[in-house]
Image (cartoon, rainbow, N blue to C red):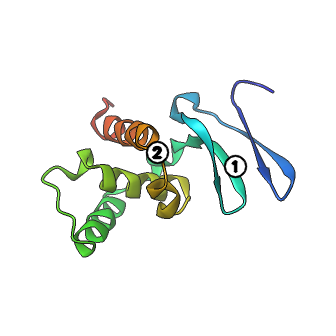
Amino acid sequence: MAANEIVEMKDGKAIVTTVENEEMILQLSKTYEFEGEKISQLDLSGLEEITADNMIKANKVMVTSGAVAIMPENDLYYTLIIAADATGIPIEFFKKLRPKDAVKVKNRVSNFFYGEE
């Protein structure tokens, strides 16, 4: 297996995905089971496709749930919503992450927002 390949099991079969931008792969501290799949890393390359509209929707989700953040791009819930959008994995998965992994996701998304161009 090459360093830029992700192997996941789905329906008892190995699915191999080639990742172009290895920097966008986030290794989790453990393998999580979610909806019959095992997830040990996240491909956050979808962050490149996030728009202001996604950010507005994430803000609306937060407000609807009663959460308020002065700087949402640094808020755990907001960044998990954005990560869910970027990966296509439901927010319910991200809500089940252990604190260590949740903070890793938050930091990666926040750093992406503030990264240089």
Q: Is residue 81 left or right of residue 68?
A: right
- Where residue 94 sits in the image (x, y, percent)? 47, 54
Instruction: Find numbered disc 1 in the image and state the secondary structure of the residue it sits on.
Output: strand
Q: Which mark is residue 98?
A: 2
Q: Is residue 87 left or right of residue 71?
A: right
> What quarter of the picture does the N terminus occupy?
top right
Q: Pointer 2 and pointer 1: residues touching (CB < 8 Å)?
A: no
Instruction: Choose the circle earlier in sequence order: 2 or 1.
Output: 1
| Image spot of residue 25 (x, y percent) | 56, 35
Amino acid type, callout 1: Lys
Q: Is residue 46 above or below residue 85?
A: above
Q: Position of residue 19 (x, y in %)?
A: 66, 36
Task: Give the residue at mark 1.
Answer: 38
Q: Nearer the viewer, residue 60 or 64?
A: 64
Disc 2 marks which amino acid? Arg
Q: Residue furthest bottom?
A: 64
